[in-house]
Image (spheres, rainbow, N blue to C red):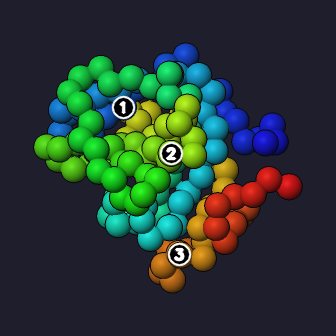
Amino acid sequence: MTAGDVQRPPASLAGGCACGAVRYEASGAAESLCFCHCASCRRAAGASPVAWGTFARERFRIVRGSLALRRSSALVERGFCAACGTALTYSHAARPSELDVTLASLDEPVALRPLCHIWVSDRVAWAPLADGLPQFPGWRTES
């Protein structure tokens, strides 16, 4: 991981779903800040791309409501609001101590910004990539 891969957010970031039924707090360093173009994320969020930030699972907590969970593949579980459907989290079995959070669900989404694009090989043609950020055909690999 390079120095640019970690952003130190405010002491605590708050966020939640569109209807307000689920609220969360995340704290600590945010890692793997990216735009994901994979078909699974596109379908889960109904958007392309989806911006994610990774937090230590112990630094994430639900403060109101509860996450509805859906297994989107053998190793992946996605968290969302059961009332309004807002996509909130992504959890991969290979990274049990981490939890990915949708950056757009933060109350202050400008507090963190994606640093690269991943799964560009799945990108839809009408989603332009003109921001100059690094692009990876699949999961980002370290140099």
* Residue at the farthest right position: 143
| Residue type for callout 2 | Ala
| Front one among 10 and 92 | 92
Q: Is residue 6 left or right of residue 68?
A: right
* Residue at the farthest front position: 74
- How far across and how far down the image is residue 52, in percent? 51, 47
- Quarter of the image for residue 112 reads top right
- How far across and how far down the image is residue 35, in percent? 56, 57
- Quarter of the image for residue 107 reads top left
Q: Secondary structure at mark 3?
A: loop
Q: Which residue corresponds to the image point at 24% horizontal and 23% vertical from the top-left?
A: 64
Where 58 falls versus 125 (above or below)? Answer: above
Q: Secondary structure at mark 2?
A: loop
- How far across and how far down the image is residue 48, in percent? 44, 66
Q: Residues within 10 Å of mark 3 (few under 14, many from 20)?
A: many
For mark 2, what is the residue? 93
| Residue type for callout 1 | Gly
Q: Which residue corresponds to the image point at 55% horizontal and 16% vertical from the top-left?
A: 11
| Front one among 40 and 25 | 40
Q: Label 3, label 1: how many angstroms apart (C-alpha)? A: 27 Å
Q: Label 2, label 3: how many angstroms apart (C-alpha)? A: 24 Å
Q: Is residue 25 left or right of residue 93?
A: left
For mark 3, what is the residue? 123
Q: Secondary structure at mark 1?
A: strand
Q: Which one is closest to the eye, mark 2 or mark 3?
A: 2
For mark 1, what is the residue? 15
Q: In the rendered structure, which disc, 2 or 3, sits on the residue that comes first in sequence?
A: 2
Numbered badge on residue 119: none
Q: In the rendered structure, which disc, 3 or 1, sits on the residue that comes first in sequence?
A: 1
